[in-house]
Amino acid sequence: MTICSVKPDFWKNRRILLTGHTGFKGTWAALWLQKMGADVIGVSLPPDGEFSLFSSVENSATVRSHFVDIRNQTELDAIVSKENPEIVLHMAAQALVRRSYREPILTYETNVMGTVNLLDSLSRASSLKAALIVTSDKVYANNNSGKPFVEGDALGGDDPYSSSKAACEIATASLAKSLFADKTIPIVTARAGNVIGGGDFSEDRLIPDIWRAARKGEPVTLRYPNATRPWQHVLESVSGYLTYLQALCEDMDNNLPKALNFGPASAETVTVGQIANQVQEAFGIKTDWLLDKANQPAEKTALALDAGLAKQALGWEAKWRAEKTLDMTVAWYRAFSDGRSVHELTLSQIEEYEKETA
């Protein structure tokens, strides 16, 4: 069986700056790093909304939280100077496509200038060994062909979110060659597939929308049921990021790729409608989903990633297929609804992932 690529001993006592640590994916990353003994420094806006994974585990976590906006260069610079991180995992972002249509300026300021602010501050951090900037599977110029994207494909984006992340890629590559030109510090980007898992309560996301509908005893409405996406469990993407960072710190020759895709095995794609059918059935919703006929901002209907380079460069590949990913996700929400400790529940799934990939 494949050995888990995340090495707990590597992370013990490491000083990790994790931006976006109050978000869905960020909280999973923070808990996993904490479990392995890392010294986690969180930088993010406070969590919002009726439910929040971070708020549910905050009292059990040992993250040192700095609640600041990454658009504030002065505050961000002060935190980096004070904490002097060894490794940086940057996930703070405005991550919603439909919100980006409503708030394009906020989206570009956060996703592009927030990253520029961070990298500028990190260029003066004396202990820095590596930084990974998380972007998106939507950074590619997508013609809806469904062909899996590889890292060398053209960047682009027809909506504010996608183009802001593509611009973030360009800014990161440029600053890595300029601000860090005289340093041997790798600055890289990671492009992950559509991430699902327990504890996501964000607006305009498929699984949270289905869960909210299930609580009301209603069917969910879908905007683009035939759209395909490279779905993967949140632990898959986080394991990719951590494996990448480990390798960057251990690669004395600095020969690793500067960008990697992290997606499901064999570019596995499933339609939105198929996911909805399986999850609604698991939640016990008897009625079919409904088509949302309102005018919607344009979204690409076909998206797939080729993660072959991550396997070649790191030995990383996704472990859980779509069925297992959905089973783990539904199990999390069911246990949450039954009142189980969120901290205990989330850690138990991290431990299961570790065991199944050991």
Image: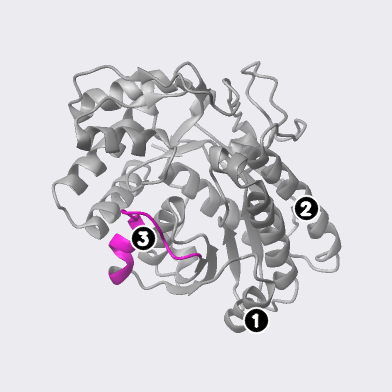
Count of marks overlaid on the render: 3
Query: In the figure, residue 125 lies in which quadrant?
Result: bottom right
- In-image side of 8 versus 135 (left or right): left
**Between discs 2 and 1, the one toward the N terminus:** 1
Q: Which mark is residue 288?
A: none
Is residue 277 a member of the stretch shown in magenta?
no
- In space, the residues marked 3 and 1 are separated at their CA atoms by 25 Å
Give the residue displayed 45% in from the left and 73% down from the top.
65
Q: Which mark is residue 54?
A: 3
Which type of secondary structure does the marked residue at label 2 adopt?
helix
Q: Is residue 231 above or below residue 170?
A: above
Q: Amino acid at mark 3?
A: Phe
Query: In the figure, residue 109 lies in which quadrant?
Result: bottom right
Contact? badges 3 and 1 (CB < 8 Å): no
Whole-percent x and y of residue 273?
39, 19
Residue hosting label 1: 81
**Segment tinted magenta in the rendering:** 45-59
Give the residue displayed 22% in from the left and 18% down from the top.
287
Which type of secondary structure does the marked residue at label 3 adopt?
helix
